[in-house]
């Protein structure tokens, strides 16, 4: 039922890493859990070199104790007889698998199962002490985790008079649960009316998108290109505080875009959403803590078509950097980006169309790399995110005798840190849903925070080109 799915409107995860060298990312889950470990994540078994916070509850059985997970990723149906399941309570931190870590918001019983709704937690809310590092993680065998049909990937519904109690009774085969993962880097999804097709990691990570509704048609592909990537990381936590964090990814990076759009008696729109597909490289257990290198994407599309009809089309590709990453230690922090910007094919020169009026389009593509324990929205750990903004305008063909304007703006920004970050529009939808629900055990369901942990920003590249250079052509959108 839609109302029942709304409670599990976000996902929480967290990082607790322990020292390891030359780990291989990929190969999937191994050990007693088998397919259950691959689907839900391997079980934690912390070693003596890591200290967890006292309110963390490790639920026994790992993936074999999980019956299903809601598409939203926050409602976990567990075997109520699993070891330590009876210790779970609102406010505790559940740690059942590498993909199932979060602050307990509420619990409810359903037959022999326990329905646990979790919220996000910062890394230092789980790990109190530990030093974790690895070099040369080979990223060559991804596992794709589709979310299915999560509520945060759809337009928010109109408010209902009641959503009932927070008991999303989801059987493993019921609609609204997460489908099984699959090998390889390809996945299909839908979000906010867009059909999405994701790819990773032969020659980059990207998303193909298509939209056809309300008189607006859009199709395109955005890609962060690279070749044979590998990664290294370091994380120190002492007394519940991060003291050192580093993440570097090599592979020779570039950006690439192509799009085609048009309007016919339609209305402009702006859509901002996470792509509901995790691309994960399972690393394995490090001192008993299951780690993954996870790639996630976000997409924003805003149209500014200034007429009742018209079309615009363009493509471009640019070299960007040899490596991406950041370092934070001894009170000093900064990006580690080997900038090498070079135009391979010009977006500006490619702009064509039939602009009966000004045709404007902005596309933003975010790619986040996280080392930690992660699942969907609330991937938590050491992360580096690159957001590329493409803005394009094509002036009115009716004014061509005077000036047919073409403009392109490109901006690339890095965001890096330790913890988690969720798109603000998504958090607003989640919290609206949660506020309408009546808890089963908790006195109230608290709102979800959009961010946790320290983070920083840095501009990697920014440029604008407009032709002809005359006042009437103005500036390209950003």
Image (cartoon, grey):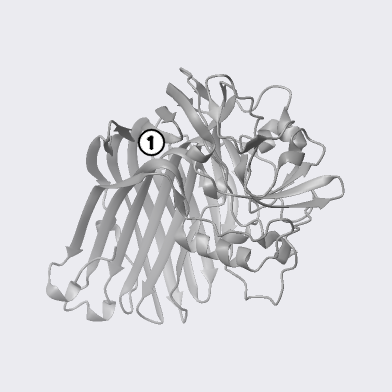
- Residue sitting nearer the eye, 180 or 6: 6
Residue 321 as seen in the image, left or right of residue 375: left
Residue lying furthest left: 470
Residue 55 visible at all: yes
Residue 399 position by quadrant: bottom left
**Image height check: is 259 above or below 457?**
below
Percent position (x, y) of residue 170? 77, 53
- Number of numbered discs: 1
Asked whether, in this view, residue 34 is left or right of residue 91, the answer is right
> What residue lies at 73% left-to-right and 31% top-to-bottom?
60
- Give whichever of 255, 334 is nearer the camera: 334
> Considering the image in quadrants, where does the N terminus appear?
bottom right
Kindly identify which residue carries mark 1.
Answer: 226
Image quadrant for the C terminus?
bottom left
**Residue 197 position within the rendered picture, expressed as x and y whole percent measured from the top left:** 54, 50
SS at circle 1 = loop
Q: Residues within 10 Å of mark 1 (few under 14, many from 20)?
A: many
Is residue 185 visible to the viewer in this orientation of the structure? no
Residue at image location 53% in from the left, 24% down from the top = 50
Residue extending farthest to the right is 111
Residue 328 image-quadrant placement: top left
Q: Give residue 146's position: percent from left, percent from top.
A: 62, 47
Residue pictured at 28% horizontal, 69% vertical? 394
Residue 226 locus on image (x, y percent): 38, 36
* Closer to the camera in the image, 115 or 144: 115
Q: Does 65 appear above or below 219?
A: above
């Amino acid at each position: 039922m839609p109302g029942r799915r709304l409670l599990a409107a976000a996902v929480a995860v967290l990082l607790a890493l322990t020292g390891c060298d030359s780990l291989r990312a990929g190969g999937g889950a191994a050990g007693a859990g088998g397919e259950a470990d691959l689907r839900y994540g391997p079980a934690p078994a912390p070693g003596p070199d890591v200290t967890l916070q006292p309110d963390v509850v490790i639920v026994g059985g790992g993936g074999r104790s999980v019956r299903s997970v809601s598409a939203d990723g926050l409602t976990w149906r567990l075997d109520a007889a699993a070891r330590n399941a009876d210790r779970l309570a609102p406010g505790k931190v559940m740690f059942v698998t590498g993909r199932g870590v979060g602050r307990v918001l509420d619990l409810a019983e359903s037959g022999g199962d326990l329905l646990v709704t979790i919220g996000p937690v910062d890394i230092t809310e789980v790990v109190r002490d530990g030093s974790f590092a690895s070099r040369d993680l080979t990223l060559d065998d991804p596992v794709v985790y589709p979310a299915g049909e999560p509520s945060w990937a759809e337009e928010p519904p109109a408010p209902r008079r009641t959503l009932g109690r927070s008991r999303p009774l989801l059987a493993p085969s019921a609609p609204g649960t997460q489908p099984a993962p699959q090998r390889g880097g390809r996945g299909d999804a839908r979000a906010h009316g867009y059909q999405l097709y994701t790819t990773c990691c032969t020659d980059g990570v990207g998303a193909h998108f298509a939209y056809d509704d309300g008189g607006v048609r859009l199709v395109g592909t955005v890609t962060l290109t690279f070749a044979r990537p590998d990664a290294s990381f370091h994380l120190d936590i002492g007394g519940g505080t991060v003291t050192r964090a580093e993440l570097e990814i090599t592979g020779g990076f570039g950006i690439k875009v192509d799009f085609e759009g048009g309007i016919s008696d339609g209305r402009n729109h702006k859509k901002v959403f996470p792509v509901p597909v995790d691309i994960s490289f399972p690393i394995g257990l490090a001192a008993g803590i299951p780690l993954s290198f996870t790639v996630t994407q976000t997409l924003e599309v805003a149209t500014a078509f200034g007429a009742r009809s018209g079309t615009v089309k363009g493509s471009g590709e640019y070299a960007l950097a040899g490596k991406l990453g950041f370092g934070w230690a001894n009170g000093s922090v900064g990006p580690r980006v080997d900038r090498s910007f070079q135009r391979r094919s010009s977006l500006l020169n490619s702009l064509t169309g039939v602009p009966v009026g000004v045709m404007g389009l902005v596309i933003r593509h975010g790619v986040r790399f996280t080392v930690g324990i992660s699942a969907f929205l609330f991937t938590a750990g050491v992360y580096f995110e690159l957001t590329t903004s493409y803005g394009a305008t094509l002036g009115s063909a009716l004014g061509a005798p005077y000036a047919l304007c073409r403009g392109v703006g490109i901006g690339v920004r890095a965001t890096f840190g330790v913890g988690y970050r969720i798109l603000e529009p998504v958090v607003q939808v989640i919290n609206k849903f949660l506020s309408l629900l009546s808890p089963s055990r908790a006195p109230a369901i608290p709102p979800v925070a959009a961010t946790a942990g320290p983070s920083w920003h840095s501009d990697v590249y920014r440029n604008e080109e407009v032709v002809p250079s005359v006042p009437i052509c103005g500036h390209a959108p950003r």
